[in-house]
Image: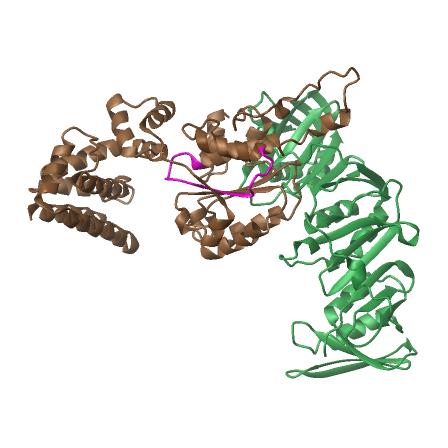
Chain colours: A green, B brown
Amino acid sequence: MKLTIERAALLRALGHVQSVVERRNTIPILSNVLLEAQSGKLKLTATDMDLAITEAVDAQVATAGATTAAAHTLYDIVRKLPDGAQVELAQKGENAPLTIRAGRSVFTLQCLPPADFPVMTKDKLPHEFTVTAEELKGLIDHTRFAISTEETRYYLNGIYLHATKEAGGVLRAVATDGHRLARFQVPLPKGAAEMPGIIIPRKTVAELRKLLDESEGNVELSLSDTKIRFAFGDAAMTSKLIDGTFPDYERVIPSGNDKILEVPCKAFASAVDRVSTISTEKSRAVKLAVGKGSLTLSATSLDNGSAVEELEVSFDAEPLEIGFNSRYLLDITERIAGESVQFTMADGASPTLVRDVDDAAALYVLMPMRV
Amino acid sequence: MCAAARDSEDQPDDSLTGPLAESELIGHAQAERALLDAWAGGRLHHAWLIAGPEGIGKATLAGRFTRFLLAHGIAGKKSQSAVEAGPSLFGDPEPTPASDAPATSLYVAPGDPVFQRVKSRGHGDLFTVTRGYDDKRKRERKVIVIDDVRHVRDFTGLTAAEDGYRVVLIDGAEDMNRNAENALLKVLEEPPKRTIFLLVSHAPGRLLPTTRSRCRLLALRALDDDNVSALLTKHRPDLAPDEKSALIRLADGSIGRALRLAEEGGVALYREMVALLGKLPDLDISAAHAFSSKLAPPTAVGYELFGELLGDWIARMVRAGAGGRAVEVLPGEVALMDRLAGGRSLDQWVEVWEKIAHLFARAAAVNLDRKQVVLSVLLTLQSAARA
């Protein structure tokens, strides 16, 4: 293998792929990045065996070939090379070390054979469709905060992505941890109608979000019931999925709630934040007392004292008192871009629906606390 | 970099390193047949407990089965390409790819991509558990802790990387502490689909009955001398014939033990030990001192070996005295055994054996001076022989 590549291009690609490589690895091959040079492209792949990121960059390939070298070391070397340098990567024969040459610097890195490198998938992913990066960001950002971290119900440790015919056909993302649920939807992309419901693991969601920050335009998704692949131009990420059944979440979304409370989102969020300062328990509970046109937020603590704050709201039903975990309330208000937030309640003990008044695509369900 | 250096430095270094790199298995054809039949029958039990004495190839068998499962996938399921291509236009019998031909052994060629990836632990559908490394104490842990096992649940919670079986291979299953075992039990009791657990253990009795009852037991027997001899020739072609035959008899059907003895100079030590014992009941005190000083430094490998060899030797003597088959590793040993066993009743020798074993265990627990331990063991033997 022998090729020449511009430092900036190599650094960018390495930067993307090396983030999945864990710093400490008991399995040596997983610390390495797979380098494949072929017909004018250098393809880099890194994996932690649960997900793999591949990126192809333009390079002048003199001799095609493949090898693997330590990802973090290679990244550090390329990072420290001067800007604008031309980097030459060369390997003589299968098990020879990899030589990196730029200007007057020469490095040699030990290699492992490419045959040792994990393979993510052999067969085809039958369901293919395209969404915009913005849509995918929306699906992730509105739901990922609700992903559970509980190990026993491992099927909740991810975002459930599925297609449904409701609302004229939508692609939906749902996440829940049993106390709250977040749902977001985008119009159904062409080719997605037949897709199976899949659960994307938390780590994949985090890596995907990082890649999305740097990409615009379209993302091509292809998936089967065991794997998903996101392709962004020259980069692609393939991941395992969570092997489980997501619960029937529709059942927990209340439909008969009739008490509608509308509050200005920003003012409400900062009031919740202020009042919750006083509560000492881990749950940081805040009580909402709703009456005609007014909302009183309060928190009491045996150790600290108490806090009360009043807000003007629009509310027309029977007065009611309800308590929430302030952290959960703030998590939701952070995701609401519109002016006001709408709570649809039944009583002080039943799940409450939370919506963004300006955005019908997002929906949240929150379980109240006893206060 | 040469291939040999790579093997020793860049492969994960634990008890599975050797077995996963070994393509051949000698002497367990019956067990292999049982695994193969279970696979071909399409009703593969999800958990297997591969039990048997130390060093006879349990992990090697587990490694072979792992590679086989990962290479062949689910019995009877055609590869994706064959299904997609559909039946032939001309009605010919479809060419069967190599992976679809009926398997006759668990062999997977070392050149196979699956072999490579399993060896490097770079196969997305293989998860291995062995004793981990303790970062705080800077040494290998003595047990498998719950954190090692919890990752099994993360692994089984995700779908397969290459479509087919997922394999969880636990080597030294008896090393799991109680918490770790309970965590594993949770997964064993509700096994995820298409996941095979292979538990390798030389002391299955130390596992919880609940764990054992979830597994299908595959008991491997010790190798016979011919097999040990063949394996020794393969791994240590440099051994002299008389050393080799002594090793075979000392090894007791365990190639692992034979190789360890060969590595640590077991036969030479055994000779010295028997020479010392030969003088009983009148111990050559200066020779005993020289012997014990040699074993005393913490770097000397012979100390633990001596405990093991001596324990075995007394056990063999008692067995021979009770009418069992006398095994002679060195010439003249049986006569010596007869002489010593004749001096005292056998149960008294059993007591001596217990006492010595206890002394070694105590010495290891509280770090007693090794030289004194060896001397006191020899003196114990002397007084036993005199009585």
Q: Residue at x 43, y 49 (%)?
A: B175
Q: Residue A312's spot in the image, x, y percent? A: 89, 78
B344, B359: nearer the viewer: B344
The location of residue B154, given as percent across then percent down, is: 61, 49
Image-based side of B190 in relation to A328, left or right: left
Is B51 colored magenta in this rendering? yes
Which region shows up in magenta?
A: B41-58
For the N terminus of chain A, which image quadrant? top right
- Is residue A243 in view from this perspective? yes
Image quadrant containing the C terminus of chain A: bottom right
User: Which residue occupies 73% across, 68% down?
Assistant: A327
Horizontal arrangement in the rendering, residue B179 relative to residue A130 (left or right): left
In terms of secondary structure, what is the magenta stretch mainly? loop
Q: Nearer the viewer, residue A92 or B100?
A: B100
In the rendered view, tell whether residue B61 sits above or below residue A292.
Answer: above
- Residue B339 among magenta residues: no
On the image, the x and y values in percent for residue B337 come to 14, 37
> For this view, does B304 lie left or right of residue A291?
left
Q: Is residue B19 visible?
A: no
Say if B213 sits above or below A178 in the image: above
Image quadrant in which you'd find residue A275: bottom right
A284 to B16, vertically: above or below: below
Measured as percent of width and height from the top left, residue B66 is found at 54, 35
Q: Is residue A344 left or right of residue B175?
A: right
